Amino acid sequence: MYFVSEQVASQVVTMAEAITCIEKVFRDYGQGRAQVFPVAMGHGPQKDSFFSMKAGLLQDQGAVGLKVGSYWPGNRSQGIPAHSSSTLLLDPQTGYARALVGASHLTCLRTAAADAVAVANLSRQDSTTLAIVGAGHQAWFELLVVREVRPIRKVFVINRSNQGAQAFSQRITNELGLEAMVAEKEEALPQADIIITITAARQALFAKDLVRPGTHISAMGADAAGKQELDPKLVASASLFADVRAQSISVGEYEQAFTSGLITEEQITTLGAVLTGSPGRQTDQEITIFDSSGMALQDIAICSLALEKALAQGLTCDSK
């Protein structure tokens, strides 16, 4: 059994490789060459701790396994991150454990890469203004990938903590040379071509009326029952897309609108289907929403790539 540490995993896969890898995952899923299995949720002994287990199979690659993503809020008092991810890759011939990959950084990469694929296929090509709701660790990755696929020139930062928003905005200006500013949602959202929400919210962050026609929204935060970033009325008025349709109405952004009877599952198109021929954005006036609840296939694919590259570079530990 091999072990790929967080440090190694963060070194061996580039952003460009991640986008290519995740786009292929969506295509394979859209063509029925990959399977996603039901998500299992659990919690630890500490208050408000929880974890999810997401498993899947990439048939053509012979890649199978599962990712455990955990959230232990008490970690912060110990000076360690509250979020953690580990991926277990199985030997496709025997079912024995083949590798354990430290996947917190790779989860950030694959999440952002999925957003890049969505933005490239669902937003207007002339989109130049981005509004990011949330200024945490993942927000930086989201910004970087959107710049890979759209000519972003202006960034609005909306965040619960003004201090965090100011720091994030300054980083954008200093490191990327973009026009960036902290703004209230009432100012920023009506000007945005693309909106990314990346929070742990459990209620709508803004009203439907703040979003102008033609906007694309990537809702990246909802990945457990009860999480919600968007107004269900906004969801009901938009063209809906998701990584995994069943997850989007059970643990994803569309849960509230679905349980309220505002939408049906049939209204949701998977991004994989868009990549393999189904309609995506059809007019410059429609609002499109992509819900990313997280796909085990993405974790399996990017961790398999990390393992392959680590082996080639002699960077793995072999516990045999």
Image (tube, rainbow, N blue to C red):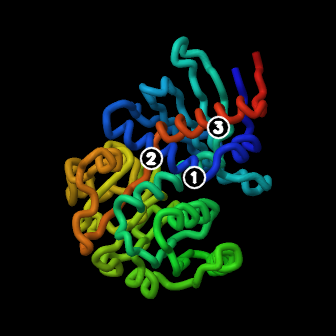
Looking at the rendered structure, the kind of residue marked 2 is: Glu
- Residue under pointer 1: 16
Give me the C-alpha separation between circle 3 and circle 2: 16 Å
Q: Is residue 295 left or right of residue 171?
A: left
Q: Earlier in the sequence, mark 2 or mark 1?
A: 1
> Mark 3 falls on what kind of element?
helix
Residue 82 in percent (x, y) is at 67, 52
Mark 1 and mark 2 in contact (Cβ < 8 Å)?
no
* Amino acid at pointer 1: Ala
Relative to 266, is 115 above or below? below
Question: Label 1: how many residues lie within 10 Å, few (<14), some (14-19) or many (20+)?
Answer: few
Numbered tag placed on residue 306 in the rendering: 3
- Sequence-earlier tag: 3 or 1: 1
Q: Residue tagged by mark 2?
A: 23
- Secondary element under disc 1, as helix, strand or loop, is helix
Residue at 62%, 77% in the rendered image: 165
Image quarter in which the C terminus is found: top right
Query: Which amino acid lies under the numbered mark 3 shown in the image of this protein?
Result: Ala
Find residue 244 and report its horizontal and vertical position in percent: 36, 44
Q: Residues within 10 Å of mark 2 (few under 14, many from 20)?
A: many
Separation of marks 2 and 1 at Cα, in angstroms: 11 Å
Given contact means CB atoms under 8 Å apart, are the residues at marks 3 and 2 in contact?
A: no
Q: Which tag, 3 or 2, sits closer to the chain's start?
A: 2
Q: CA distance from mark 3 to mark 1?
A: 13 Å
Q: Residue at x 46, y 68 (%)?
A: 150
| Coordinates of residue 185 in the picture (x, y in percent) | 46, 81
Quarter of the image holding residue 7? Answer: top right
